Amino acid sequence: MTANASDGGVGDGRDRSPSERVDVCVVGAGPAGGLVADRLANAGHDVVVLEAGPRFDRADRIERVERDIRPSYHPHEVWDMGGERDAYTTSGDRGYPLNAARVKGVGGTTLHWQGMVFRLHEGDFDEHARAAGVDPWPIAYDDLRPYYASAEDELGVSGTAGDNPFAPPREEPYPMPGFPPSYSDSLFAEACDALDVTMHTVPNARNSERRDGRSACQGWGTCKPVCPSGAKYDATVHVGRAEEKGARVVDHAPVQRLEHDRAGDAVTTAVYATPDGEEHVQEAREFVLAAGGVEIPRLLLLSASEAYPRGLANSSRLVGKYFHDHLFAGMGGRLDEPTRQNHVGFLTSESHQFYDDVTDDRGPFKLEFLNYAGPSPVELALGADSFGDDLLDELRGAYGNAIAMGGLAAQPPRKENYVSLDSSVTDDHGNPVPDVHWSLDDRTRATLRAANDRQREILDELGVDVQWTVGPDDTGPAFHHMGTTKMSADPESGVVDPQLRTHDLRNLSIASSSTFTYGGALNPTLTIAALALKCADHVDERL
């Protein structure tokens, strides 16, 4: 298709010229941006969403599964990551593999997430943070409690209420029944019973039954990186609903900077680029940033002005500071019996029994009973030299008795871990790329060591020949980018207030894990969703 004057040179005929001044401009079409746009459009507001990446055709998902399993493709190619558009640098004691998990495009990183959704524990908002030597949240669990319930309904969560005795209090059942434990979970259960370790099911943002026009889980087992059936929630659900209610979504529209009024009190425009090299100006009454914990601080720093020489909304000098993640602890090997691994692509059982046993020396951690240990039959076949019956015999001998545990450990937010700009490297629009400064501290290592100790006890009791361990030093991130625009009641101690509005600008809000004061050790997406709904309500009140 030939590009026209308004489609930005993409060639798909979509109009990418700016709208007349709207009520709300949302930056980012991931889970937070989709929820904000849907809720505000439903309230009758005129909404424009600017998304840096493309729209992905759902019909291409089978092809993307094939890209994942074929050795000729790089993992980044599954969701078109990499290149100058996604360039970054990394500093500090450890390199941070930013492109290993993020997706730029409509749907964001939920396009290839695992789908586990938890409410943070009550202690994560206060006691756990204080034990780590950092500020507590300026809000409590009870402030998010109704938003957590709403987020579970919006995402469509399958779970078993009351099954987890260590979870925070709740009143309502989950929207759908939980998934049954896997076969390997039953093997773990024998060892856990002997050790008095309590297992419980995992709430998942995937349909256990047909709901909202989406099928029940079909058991593809390729949840990460692609759910072909659409049973697993991704943000295209709410982006689509927002569009049905009148919101306008502009893809291929990376925001270059935000501009404010003469007084420096309010944002007036978002300047975005299109692939033809042109820049466009979108005006709005309210702006919501929902582009993730790395790109949000980067955008604020790129928006430096005479009034904000260190970056927009950065009078506290904390934009980009306190970057933290969850660290992976894992252990696995072989069991002298079939384990039926790689039949389920997501977790069905965990243990949070030790989560709240926080001390001055270590933070929270959770234990995961993995359902995808070892290579899949497809991966084994691709690497084999044999064919036919010989290949089948080889697969039968090599596949089926792998078993493993995982877990997430909390990392304290520290000023020395941060996102800044690296002007020595530029992206495809000539902007400095984000530089992720990241390191581990002794408290995080101690938390990982405690998780590994528990994993070793369980695997030894089960009789596993342990062949590998991840942690405490040989570890990696869970790619949960938190803390870079932290929430605070005091303007000097953070970037946004408890209503998710920046302290410095009255019409600029942030809906993201970047606002987390402390991230605990639980997957953050449900908290992101709850905060996004809270943010949308406050924006609605102001309009």
Image (cartoon, rainbow, N blue to C red):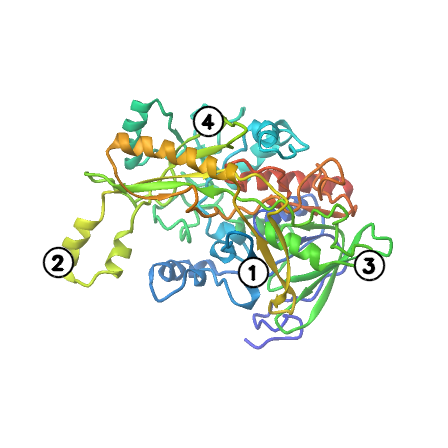
The image shows residue 169 at horizontal and vertical percentages of: 54, 24
403 sits to left or right of 481: left
Dot 3 corresponds to which residue?
306
**14 or 225: nearer the eye?**
225
Q: Residues within 10 Å of mark 2 (few under 14, many from 20)?
A: few
Q: Earlier in the sequence, mark 1 or mark 3?
A: 1
CB contact under 8 Å: marks 4 and 3: no
- Percent of width and height locating residue 239: 58, 51
The Cα atoms of the two marked residues, 4 and 3, are separated by 53 Å
**Residue matched to label 2:** 389
- Of label 2 and label 1, which has the lower sequence position? 1
Return the residue at label 1: 89
Q: As displayed, is residue 273 above or below residue 136?
A: below
- Tag 1: Cα neighbours inside 10 Å, few (<14), some, or many (≥20)? many
Would you name the residue on which mark 4 appears?
161
Sequence order check: which comes first, mark 4 or mark 1?
1
Disc 2 marks which amino acid? Asp
Q: Residue at x 66, y 71 (%)?
A: 6
Q: Nearer the viewer, mark 3 or mark 2?
A: 3
Question: Where in the figure is residue 321, as x and y percent of width and height?
Answer: 65, 47
x and y, in percent, of residue 327 in the image: 47, 43
- Quadrant where the N terminus is found in the figure: bottom right
Nearer the observer: mark 2 or 4; the answer is 2
